[in-house]
Image (spheres, rainbow, N blue to C red):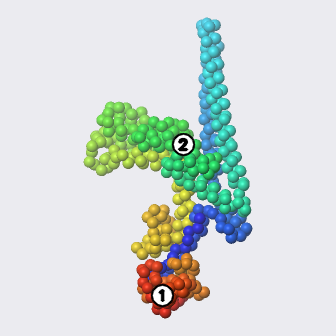
């Protein structure tokens, strides 16, 4: 997508400092007049940004393999142990032995069904990885525009999934036929935990932590500890103080060595209670703590699956805004055509540095064309600057009259003053 240059319908005093802010490819598309060499360069740069596209299904595939391996190992160990017990028992009757072995056979048949189902899931996920590799291999200079359109749709689906618009994301993926190229199933897993946390339930989130315990420990995650703290707070809110103390001894005490300050803060709520007016403890009982847990879970979920912490759409938009951001974008007189005149774009651009501009340029507000020696700027009596080409065309159509598109001022073409760019 191309963002048009920002127009300069400002006063003549600003002419020397106004900067042309043209940026291309905040969200990648190809133009018809792009040379083959530049297309290949654009293609190379595009593929460098596909780390998440390949890693997410691969991480999901590895997770499924580990889960199937744990299930098989657990069941086989249990069966072997049961067989050994039967073999070592001298008092078991023949009928009891047959009954026990029949039970073990049923258990093994159940394991077989689980492994077959797991194998099908692994094959589907492997096909998903293969489809994504094929998609990357299919791009070339000739179909770059079409490939970028698909990429744009993937970015939109990613954003919708992160913002919890699951149904809309699925419909877009299905209508665009890109189900294998987006992470619907991965985010469906996250949806269950997010929905539970929004309903103030920690059970599914704790189960997720147990399932990913080793990886969370390796990344030094505090998410499980935060969940345990919230569960303790809810017990205090319900005035179930003895149960809260027992809960703290069992689930919070093991965290004391690494999170003693947070633990001491939360334990003090037993004395202050949920109706306290002390700000330091009152905040622990506020509903926004659940929103914090939702955000915390999403961050941990993204890390575990190799995703960017920010939506891809935000990252691409920030790439474009970094070229557009100048000090004048945040002034009251910022033109409406400037994306940074909108509050949402300003929030995205806030952490970005200002664009480095070596030379000042003027872009005509009317034609969006560069004003230079071939098309010099001219100043209206009200101080607004436009290109000679635009003003001549306007004068020819209106019998020598010029109407300022910004203020509505009407004047003669002869009233204009030529401006010089130094």
Q: Where 268 falls versus 28 (above or below)?
A: above
Instruction: Answer with left or right where residue 259 lies relative to residue 363.
Output: left
What residue is shown at x 65% (from left), y 13% (from top)? Answer: 87
Front residue of 70/39: it is: 39
Q: Dot 2: few (<14), some (14–19), or many (≥20) neighbours within 10 Å?
A: some
Which quadrant of the structure image shows residue 146?
Answer: bottom right
Q: Can residue 72 be seen in this view?
A: no
Gap between marks 1 and 2 measured at Cα: 62 Å
Q: Can residue 197 be seen in this view?
A: yes
Quadrant of the image occupied by residue 1? bottom right
Quarter in which the C terminus is drawn: bottom right
Residue at mark 1? 401
| Above or below: residue 388 compared with residue 328 | below
Q: What element carries label 2?
A: helix
Residue 368: image location, x then y, percent: 55, 77
Pinpoint residue 95: horizontal percent, then vertical percent: 62, 7
Residue shown at the point (49%, 40%) measured from the top left: 192
Residue 203's disc is: none
235, 298: nearer the viewer: 298
**Label 1 vs label 2, nearer the camera:** 1
Residue 381 point in image, percent of width and height: 43, 88
Lateral position of residue 280 relative to residue 368, left or right: left
The reply to whether callout 1 and callout 2 are in contact (CB within 8 Å) is no
The residue indicated by pointer 2 is: 188
Of callouts 1 and 2, the N-terminal one: 2
């Amino acid at each position: 997508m191309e963002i048009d240059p920002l127009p300069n319908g400002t006063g003549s005093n600003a002419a020397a400092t106004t900067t042309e802010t043209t940026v291309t490819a905040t969200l990648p598309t190809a133009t018809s007049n792009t040379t083959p060499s530049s297309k290949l360069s654009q293609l190379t740069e595009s593929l460098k940004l596909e780390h998440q596209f390949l890693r997410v299904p691969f991480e999901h595939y590895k997770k499924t393999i580990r889960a199937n391996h744990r299930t098989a190992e657990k069941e086989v160990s249990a069966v072997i142990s049961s067989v050994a017990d039967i073999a070592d028992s001298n008092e078991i009757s023949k009928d009891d032995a047959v009954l026990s072995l029949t039970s073990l056979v049923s258990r093994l048949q159940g394991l077989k069904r689980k492994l077959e189902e797991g194998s099908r899931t692994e094959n589907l996920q492997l096909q998903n990885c293969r489809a994504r590799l094929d998609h990357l291999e299919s791009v070339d200079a000739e179909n770059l525009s079409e490939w970028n359109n698909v990429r744009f749709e993937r970015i939109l689906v990613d954003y919708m999934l992160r913002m919890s618009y699951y149904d809309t994301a699925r419909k877009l993926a299905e209508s665009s036929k890109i189900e294998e190229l987006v992470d619907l199933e991965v985010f469906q897993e996250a949806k269950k935990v997010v929905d539970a946390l929004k309903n103030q339930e920690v059970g599914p989130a704790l189960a997720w932590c147990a399932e990913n315990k080793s990886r969370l420990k390796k990344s030094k995650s505090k998410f499980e500890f935060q969940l345990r703290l919230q569960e303790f707070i809810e017990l205090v809110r319900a005035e179930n103080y003895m149960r809260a103390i027992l809960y703290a001894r069992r689930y919070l005490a093991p965290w004391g060595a690494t999170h003693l300050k947070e633990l001491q803060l939360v334990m003090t709520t037993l004395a202050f209670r949920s109706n306290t007016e002390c700000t330091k403890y009152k905040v622990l009982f506020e509903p926004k703590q659940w929103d914090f847990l939702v955000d915390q879970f999403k961050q941990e979920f993204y890390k575990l699956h190799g995703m960017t912490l920010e939506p891809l759409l935000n990252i691409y938009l920030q790439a474009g805004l970094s070229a557009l951001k100048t000090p004048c974008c945040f002034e009251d007189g910022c033109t409406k055509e400037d994306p940074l005149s909108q509050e949402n774009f300003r929030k995205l651009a806030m952490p970005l540095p200002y664009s480095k501009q070596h030379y000042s340029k003027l872009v005509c507000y009317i034609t969006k064309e560069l004003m230079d020696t071939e098309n010099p700027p001219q100043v209206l009596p009200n101080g607004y600057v436009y290109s000679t080409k635009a003003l001549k065309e306007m004068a020819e159509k209106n019998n020598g009259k010029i109407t300022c598109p910004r203020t509505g001022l009407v004047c003669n073409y002869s009233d204009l003053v030529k401006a010089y760019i130094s």
